[in-house]
Image: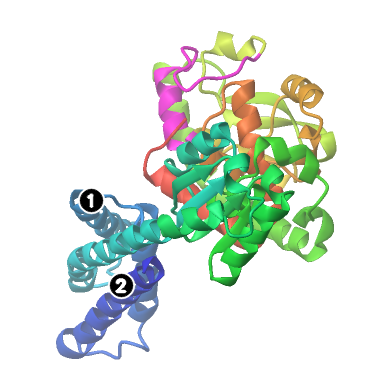
């Protein structure tokens, strides 16, 4: 249902923009729409409407009717404002106001309807994925907590059994099957101990034949939560291909994409510098840029480049874990972080090949030494280029402690395991949503 709602939202935008453009050309302006320059600009406006809808979370990330209406209004307003600013900059009426504002108004109720449709699909998905888990008490609690946050697929633990309660020495006694039937479950999870018991595996086989999905705990983490469990990291660290290492074509395409983004982004950097200079003079006095040594691909070090966001004296001191409300951050620096403008200079690192657009977060050498000493498989993350954004950043958010670093490593291993252009695109999309939603650090 969510996929259908997304398709309908984009189709609605196309019908609104192109339909109004065609009507204006034939009934008002009396010109050939498809052979005019306005047709190309109509397509650009269409793309802006779709991107702004995606950025604000339409149609599938809104919660409640108020959120749907506000998101729809925001999407239309942002796209209309963007195309209007372009027209103002070039000093020409690229699109008639009839098309720009007419499409924006039409799409508000349409986007709300699509969001409502997607919301109904979410409810049915939650009812469909009912899970019976044969795991420990601690793991059951952890799964419920994880599923209550931001899972990749909606599910609910309807029953959890201990290993002893799920197994049976009597052919006619099938406690796992009875639990699945009693709770109308559609998914069964087996931890490692349960997988080694013949009676439990036999019951799972019968359930599988009846159409119930059976997953190991590791696979459930991977498919439903988008991460690998901590206790599996070392065991599976060598059991999968890494795109940048094992698929040469992917590595080349990824690098070409990085260079393209860096070249375009450097224009935004050039525009931002004068504003940052003025802001620094007013409320963030000190050097413009901040340089810090980070660990890159294959363990090589490089200097990462950012706009300075902390007090100049603090920036020169030995670095500590940075917290979300770090007192060292200046008011203007906080604005730079919240808008992610402070990240723009890193495009120079991307162009130099030290960073990628998508990849694990680059850490400082002394943190890497500490974590590598405590986590034997930690260095695997350095087999690829670190990134401006990554799966761990969009899934977990800010990491300010060693415990956070370990939790984020679960998501980084998921990224290494599934590294592809498709996953990179998903991460970029979620990053755009995060930035558009003001979810700064």
Residue placed under numbered mark 2 in the picture: 13
- Which residue is outermost to the left? 28
Taking depth in this image into account, of 180 and 192 the one nearest to the observer is 180
Give the vertical position of 398 relative to 104 (above or below).
above
Q: Is residue 288 above or below residue 131?
A: above
User: Badge 1 local density, few (<14 within 10 Å), some, or many (20+)?
Assistant: few
Q: Is residue 387 left or right of residue 273?
A: right
Q: Is residue 325 magenta?
A: yes
Residue 432, given in percent of the width and then of the height, sits at: 46, 49
Q: How many marks?
A: 2
**Of marks 2 and 1, which one's residue comes earlier in the chain?**
2
Q: Which residues are magenta?
A: 319-341
Where's residue 167, x and y in %? 63, 48
Q: Nearer the viewer, residue 335 or 242?
A: 242
Residue located at (60% from left, 66% from top): 206
- How dense is the environment of label 2, judged by Cα within 10 Å: few (below 14), some, or many (20 and up)? many
Secondary structure type for disc 2? helix
Residue displayed at 68% across by 54% down = 199
The reply to whether the magenta stretch includes residue 84 is no
Residue at label 1?
64
Is residue 229 rendered to the left or right of residue 100? right
Quadrant position of the N terminus in the picture: bottom left
Q: Position of residue 270 (x, y in %)?
A: 53, 42
Residue sitting at x 22%, y 68%: 110
- Disc 2/disc 1 C-alpha distance (Å): 22 Å
In the image: residue 118, left or right of residue 306: left
Q: Nearer the viewer, residue 84 or 90?
A: 84
- x and y percentages locating residue 338 in the rendered image: 42, 32
Front-lying residue, 291 or 51: 51
- Residue 198: in sight, yes or no? yes
């Amino acid at each position: 249902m969510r996929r259908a709602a997304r398709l309908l939202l984009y189709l609605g935008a196309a019908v609104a923009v192109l339909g109004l453009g065609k009507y204006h050309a034939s009934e008002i302006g009396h010109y050939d729409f498809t052979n005019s320059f306005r047709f190309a600009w109509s397509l650009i406006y269409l793309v802006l409407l779709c991107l702004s809808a995606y950025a604000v979370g339409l149609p599938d990330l809104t919660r409640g009717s108020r959120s749907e209406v506000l998101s729809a209004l925001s999407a239309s307003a942002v796209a209309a404002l963007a195309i209007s600013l372009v027209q103002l900059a070039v000093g020409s009426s690229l699109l008639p106001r009839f098309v720009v504002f007419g499409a924006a108004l039409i799409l508000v109720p349409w986007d709300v309807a699509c969001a409502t449709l997607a919301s109904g699909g979410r409810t049915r998905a939650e009812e469909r994925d009912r899970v019976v888990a044969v795991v420990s008490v601690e793991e059951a609690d952890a799964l419920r907590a994880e599923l209550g946050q931001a899972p990749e697929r909606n599910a609910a633990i309807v029953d959890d059994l201990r290993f002893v309660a799920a197994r049976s020495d009597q052919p006619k006694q099938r406690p796992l099957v009875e639990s699945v039937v009693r709770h109308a479950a559609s998914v069964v999870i087996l931890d490692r101990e349960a997988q080694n018991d013949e009676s439990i595996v036999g019951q799972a086989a019968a359930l599988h034949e009846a159409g119930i999905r059976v997953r190991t705990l590791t696979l459930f983490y991977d498919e439903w939560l988008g991460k690998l469990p901590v206790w599996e990291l070392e065991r599976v660290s060598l059991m999968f291909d890494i795109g940048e290492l094992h698929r040469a074509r992917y590595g080349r395409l990824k690098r070409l994409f990085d260079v393209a983004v860096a070249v375009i982004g450097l224009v935004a950097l050039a525009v931002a510098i004068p504003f940052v200079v003025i802001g620094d003079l007013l409320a963030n006095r000190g050097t413009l840029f901040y340089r810090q040594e980070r660990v890159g691909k294959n363990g090589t070090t490089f200097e990462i480049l950012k706009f300075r966001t902390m007090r100049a004296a603090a920036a020169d001191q030995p670095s500590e874990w940075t917290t979300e409300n770090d007192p060292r951050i200046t008011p203007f620096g906080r604005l730079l972080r919240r808008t992610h403008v402070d990240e723009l200079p890193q495009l120079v690192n991307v162009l130099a090949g030290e960073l990628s657009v998508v990849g694990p977060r680059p850490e400082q050498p002394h943190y890497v030494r500490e974590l590598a000493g405590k986590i034997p498989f930690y260095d695997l993350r350095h087999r690829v280029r670190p990134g401006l954004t990554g799966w761990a950043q969009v899934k977990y958010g800010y990491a300010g402690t060693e415990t956070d670093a370990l939790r984020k490593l679960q998501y980084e291993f998921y990224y290494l395991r599934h590294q592809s252009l498709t996953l990179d695109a998903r991460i970029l999309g979620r990053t755009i949503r995060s930035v558009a939603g003001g979810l700064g650090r």
